[in-house]
Image (cartoon, rainbow, N blue to C red):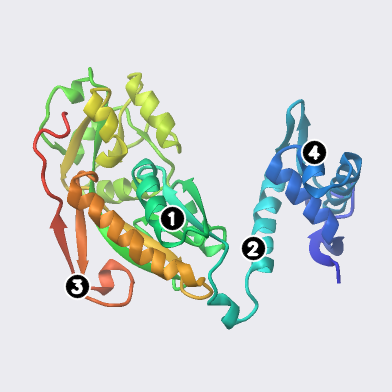
Amino acid sequence: MNAFNFLAREPGTSLQSDAKERPFDLRELRYFHSVARTGNFGRSARELNVSQPAISHQVRKLEEGLGTQLLVRHGRGVALTPAGACLRDRLETIMQLLASPLDDAAAGTVPGTVSLAVPAEAGPLLAAPLAREFRARWPNVALNIREGSGSELEEWVLHHRVDIAVVQDPPVLPELEVSPILTEDLGLVAPVHSRAAEDHRPLRLRDLTGETLILPGPQHWIRRRVDSAAQQYGVRLAPAMQVSSVASTKVMVRNGIGCTILPLTAVQDEVARGALAFRPISHPPLTSTCALAFRRHGANAVVAEFADIAREAMAALVDSGAWPGAQIIKLGWKSAGLPRACVAETVPAQSQPGRIAI
C-alpha cells in the first residue's frame, strides 16, 4: 500500500488533544523530504519532474494532516521548523532502510556509495588521507564524507545515516562495533596575547578556574571529559559561553573573547602560524580515545575492510607526526570493541622538536 501510518492531529486541534492515526500518502512524504533536503520548492520540482504548485499542495496536505507547520517560506526558499526537522530526520532513516538490501546475499555485494562521518576537531586532518585510501581501493564506489560534532556521529551510525564514523570517547552500545585507534591529549587554547599564553608550561585543571571558557554543550565529548575530570578533582569549571562549532570557537578565541579546550590536532595550523596558543593540561591529564564505529549487523561488504584501511591511515598520521599529541593503541585482541575489553598498549608518536611553536 502506498501509505504510511503516523500519529497525527486533526487540523485545528491543540497539542494537548488526543492524537489519532491517519494514513499519509507516500507522495506527501516524498515531496516534503525533497523540499526539506533541497531547501527550495523550485529545485524540488526540477528534481521530481513535477510542477511547483503540485509539491506545494502535497506539503500543505501533510502539514494539515499533522496539525503543525513544517516549513517557513522566505525569499530564498524554505526553512524547517523544529517539527519539520524532526520529520526530515525520520524520513531520511526510512529512505535509507527502504534502499538497503532485503537479504543477506545482497548485503555482501559492493555498494555504489559508502558514507563516512568525521569529527569537526579532526576532520581537516582526516578527510584527505581517508578519501585517498578509499579511492585507491574502490575507484568505482562513491564516498560521501560528513563532518559532525559530539554525540551526533554515533547517532548517524545508529540511524543508518552514515555507514562508518570516526568518533571520540564512544559510549558502550551493543549495536555498534567499535575499534579504538589512538588516544590524544587535550589542552587549553588561548589568544596569543593573553595571560595564559605567556607561560609555556603545562597547566593544572584548577588553573582554568579563572579563565573565560568557551565550551560545547553537555552532550559533546570534550565537555563530558572536562566535566568528569572537574567533578573528580573537585574543580568548578563553569563555561561563560557554550558554542557547538569548532570553527566559530576558534574565531572567538583568536579575537580574545575567551579560551577553549581542544586537542592539539584541531589547532595545529593556527598554533604553527602564531595565531593561537596551546598549553597542555597535565594534572590530571585530559585525554580522549579516538575510534572507528560501524553497525554490527547490516554493514555492507566495504565497511569492515574500509575500517581496517582507515585504522592504518590514522596510525600512519600519528607515526609521521602529522597528528601531534596522539598515541597509537596497540590492541591485544582480535575483535573490535571498547578499550576496557582489551589489553591495550599506547605507543607515543614520534616527537619532532620545534615542529609546533607555542
Q: Which residue is mark 3?
A: 343
Give, as a three-letter code, the residue at label 4.
Phe
Question: Which mark lies nearer to you, 3 or 2?
Answer: 2
* SS class, disc 3: loop
Give, as a three-letter code, the residue at label 1.
Arg
In the picture, measured across the screen, residue 30 lies left or right of residue 256, that is: right
Residue at the image point whose x is 78% and y is 55% from the top: 30
Gap between marks 1 and 2 measured at Cα: 23 Å
Residue at the image point whose x is 49% and y is 52% from the top: 152
Most foreground residue, 351 or 260 = 351
Residue 128 in picture, x, y percent from top left: 38, 46
* SS class, disc 1: helix
Of callouts 3 and 2, the N-terminal one: 2
Question: Which mark lies nearer to you, 4 or 3?
Answer: 4
Task: Say which mark, if any, is on residue 16.
Answer: none
Gap between marks 3 and 2 measured at Cα: 37 Å
Task: Say which mark, if any, is on residue 96.
Answer: 2
Give, as a three-letter code, the residue at label 3.
Val
Q: Which residue is mark 1?
A: 135
Question: Residue 91's image quarter?
Answer: bottom right
Label 1 crowd bin: few (<14), some (14–19), many (20+), radius 10 Å: some
Of callouts 1 and 2, the N-terminal one: 2
Of callouts 3 and 1, the N-terminal one: 1
